[in-house]
Structure formats: structure tokens, C-alpha cells
Image (spheres, coloured by chain):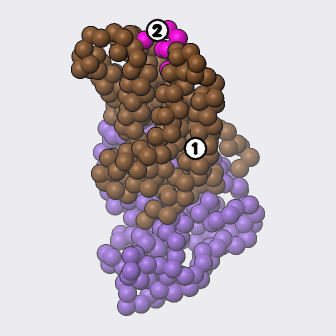
Chain colours: A brown, B purple
Amino acid sequence: MAKHSGGTRMISLFLRDLKLSMRAGGGALIGVLFFMTVVAVVPFAVGPDLNLLSRIGPAILWIGALLASLLGLDRLFQAEREDGSLDLMLMQETPLVLTVLVKCLAHWTATGLPLVIAAPLLGLFMNMNEVAIGATMLTLLVGTPAITFIGATGAAVAVTLPRGGLLVSILVLPLAIPVLIFGVSAAYAAVQDPAPFLPPLLILIAITLFFAVIGPLAAALALRSASD
Amino acid sequence: MPIRLRVEGLSAKRGEDLIFHDISFIVAAGEALIVTGPNGSGKSTLLRVLAGLLVPESGVVRLDDTTADISHPRELCHYLGHRNAMKRELTVEENLSFWKSFMGDSVGGSGIGLEEATEALGLGGISHLPFGYLSAGQQRRMAMAKLLVAYRPVWILDEPTAALDAAADRLFAGLVERHLGAGGIVIAATHQPLGVAARELRMTGFTGVCEGAES
């Protein structure tokens, strides 16, 4: 296998998944549209109390991003299984863990990164100041990959279920709660003075790194045993 | 060095039911094995066990005399199942070039170019179309092009010619012939004759399995 290093294989998988999520039915835009919808209706529901809006802003942004990240996660492996691609991926010499990791990274780039980019605009809706917006963006940037890694495990477990979407969300949500807690508390710490910003951010990064290892491992294990 | 696929005492279960029991055979380089039998006799299950996608209840699948450093025989196998493993949203070219670079070549051979592969299946010039635009027969033929773009010594084919017309049948028989000529191994489950000289393994469902003579 001298001609193709593992790197080329993984890059081609990454680019293919990215391409697929951009094409019709890929769902890259669905997540960010859902995120915008959730956050955009909050000011109408809460009313024109600007202080209240800016106070709950980071939390609402995080809740919106969490729900938007869960959307479409169930298709991560199901689409591959339906057309038989998963069979071929299971057969390769490339470790399945690596394949899963790259699929997660591509999924996050297509669905998670747009959320981070859309966050400043939605922060304005919530009357957040620039420090709060910056802090929320940063926490979303380091926190949302964890949701994808956790979600991959749920998606792998539910891969054989035809309507696994809601099940994946329910399976994944409890594990995603720490991400939400530390993400929001770091974002608040940036604007509220006595609270330190760095410790919750570092814990958030640690959570992401932890799930970057555990998530693909568990997902690969689940996919191996789910093949029929 | 010629390879040899050796299967010993293989049995597999689907749920609680034993699908087949104690199947043993050896396929040497350049040989084809046709798996026949009525619907539900376990042809597909056998092929999925060979491809390492199902864990056998007992028995082993081994590749002898291979120089490749592999942890499981499936790494030297192509598996063409009922589903084509191609994305409808991507063009044929994107699909094939993905599989070419994702699968890579096994030791001892190299895949051919995309153009050449689609020409070999008689579908040159339409590889710029999205895969979903093609007819069922064309889709099947493009899925077969995967076998050519990434080299694997062992082809495991599950009813490969189901949607094909007579001309494509002959085309495919030619490809199989060439693969066997180059020292490859082909194991195919099929209802129609494949058009190449092959041994036959007749699956009879649970009543027992016997290996047929040369056909």
C-alpha cells in the first residue's frame, strides 16, 4: 500500500463528506438556519427588555447551538449504511476509529463551524456586547466539536434504526450537558467580573479532547457490532 | 506469490437460526467460485461472512500465501453487495475517485484510471453526471468500475449482474475473466450463469450443503 498513505485516504474522505453536506439534502445549511430561527424568536418571546436579553444571551446562543448540532447527527452513519458505503469502510485496512474521527471532523466543519460564524450576528439580536460575543464565539468554537464526537457514538448505536433521529438526541443529551455548563459559564465569566474566564474554558477544551478520543472509539465499536 | 482463499468449517447464524453449517472450500488464484441456491439459502450471508462483515458462528476464513501484512482477509477483498456504495448526490467521477483514493491498492497490483475503468464498463463519457441520474443498469455498471479503480485480489460479488442487459453481462464476464487471468479470485452469488468457467457451491438452505463438480 505504498502509493496511498493513510493521509491521502483521510483527506479524500474529509473532502467527500464536506462535498456531500454542501449538495442538496446534505443538511449543512439546515443546522445554521435552525440555530438562527431558535435565537431569533427569543427576543419576541422575552420582550424588549434589553438588559434581560443581554443577560440571557450567551445561554440562549449555547442552547440554540446545542440543538442545531444535534440536528442531522443521526444521518452521519445511516446515510452510509443505506447505500452500502459503510460495508466498504468497515472492510478497509485503515482503522475504523480513524475513519469515524475524520467523518466527525468533516461533519463539524460543515455544520458546527457555520454556527460559530453565525454567532456574532445572533449575538447582536440578543443585545450582547462585543466581549460577550467574542467569548461566546470562542466557547462555541472549542465546545461544539465535543457535541459532534458524543453524537457520533449515538449515531453509531442507532445506525440500524430507521427513525433514529430523536433517539440519538436523547441518548446524546445527558453527555452533552457538561459541555453546555462549562461553555455557558466560560462565556459568562468573560463579562461578569469576579468569575475567572480561563478555568471553565480549559475544562471545556479538556472535555472536547476527551470526547475526541472516547467518541470515535465507542462509535467504531458500535458500528462493528451493528453490521448485519 | 499466488494466493489461496481457504474456508474451514464455516457456519453462521442470523438471529437465532443457523443459516448454514460446516462449509469448507479452497479457492486458488485464478479460480472462480459460483454460489448458487434458492432465495434464502444463505448465499448473501456466506458472502458477508467472507467479507468480514458478519462474524461466523464457527470456522475460519483465511488467505494463504499472501505477502501482504494484513490483520483480516477482508482487507484484500472487494465486496459488491446489493447496494452500490455510491452517492447519488456526487458525480460518477467524484464517487469513483473517492473510492480509488480511500481504498488504495493492495500489494501486487494497481487500479486503473477512472476514464479507463468507465470505458471498460462501456460507459465512457458520462462520468460527469450525478450518480443519481443514471439508470439502474448504468448505476450497477458504475459500481463495478470500483472493482477496477482500486486493486484487490479477491472479488466478492453478490448477484452482480442482476440489473444488467445481455451485452453488459458479456462485458462483465470479460472483466472477471481478465481478473482471474491475472491471478485473482472471484466468489459470486448468482442465479444467472456468469459466463466464465467456475466451480459451483450449491447452497440448499438448512438441509445441508454440498460442493458441486466443475460446471
Q: For residue B38, which quarter of the picture?
A: bottom left
Up/down of B7 relative to B178, above or below: below
Whether residues under marks 1 and 2 lie with C-beta atoms below 8 angstroms apart, the answer is no
State the residue position of label 1.
A211
Name the secondary structure under disc 1. Answer: helix
Q: Nearer the viewer, residue B35 or A33?
A: A33
Q: Which residues are magenta?
A: A128-138
Q: Nearer the viewer, residue B48 or B29?
A: B48
Q: Is residue A133 magenta?
A: yes
Rendered location of residue B196, percent (x, y): 48, 68
Please report, as a chain letter, where disc 1 is located: A
Rendered location of residue B142, percent (x, y): 43, 46
Q: Amino acid at mark 2?
A: Asn
State the residue position of label 2.
A129
Name the dominant secondary structure of the magenta segment.
helix
Say left or right for B165 vs B147. Answer: left
